[in-house]
Image (cartoon, rainbow, N blue to C red):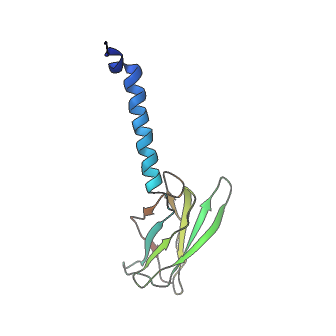
Amino acid sequence: MNRAWMRSRWVIVPGILAILVGGWNLYVSANAHGVIEGRVIDLAGRPVPGATVTLYNRSFITNEARAEARTGADGRFRFDDNSSHAVQLQAEAPGFARGARVTLRLWFRGQDTTMHEPLVLAAR
C-alpha cells in the first residue's frame, strides 16, 4: 500500500493547522474566567490600601464603567467577572489624585491576566 499521500502537503499543512487551532482553543478554555489582578501603589512604591479600581469596557465610541474593586492592605485588587477583551483600569483613593486610565490589551474575551505594571497614584 502506497502511503506517500500522507507525507504530502495536502495532508501535513491541514494537520498542523488543526493541531494549532485545537491547542489555541484548549488554552483559551483553560484561561477565560475573566480574572484580572493587579496592585495599586503610590509614587514611592508603597501599596495603597482601600483604593477603588474601576474597570471600563472599551467600545468603538465610549468607555463604560463595568465594575469596581477595592484594594486590600497589600494594595492588590481582583476582578472576577470581566467578559471583555478591551478594558481600561483606573484607580483612585482618598488623599491621592485620580490615576491615569491604563489600557489592558487582552488576546481574547474574558482572558485571565495579572498586570505586570501596577497602577500608580500621586498624593494630592
Residue closest to the eye, 14 or 112:
14
> x%, y% of residue 6?
35, 20
Q: Is residue 110 above or below residue 120?
A: above
Q: Is residue 5 above or below residue 117?
A: above
Tell me, yes or no, if residue 111 can be seen here: yes
Point 48% across, 51% down: residue: 107
> x%, y% of residue 45?
36, 78
> x%, y% of residue 116?
38, 64
**Which residue extends farthest front?**
1
Q: Is residue 58 above or below residue 93?
A: above
Point 39% across, 23% down: residue: 11
Quarter-wise, where is residue 49 in the image? bottom left
Tell me, yes or no, if residue 101 can be seen here: no
Point 47% across, 53% down: residue: 29
Residue closest to the eye, 67 or 50:
67
Q: Is residue 69 above or below residue 10?
A: below
Q: For the N terminus, which image quadrant?
A: top left
Residue closest to the eye, 123 or 31:
31
> x%, y% of residue 3?
32, 16
Name the side, left or right, on which 30 lies relative to 93. left
Name the side, left or right, on which 109 lies relative to 45. right
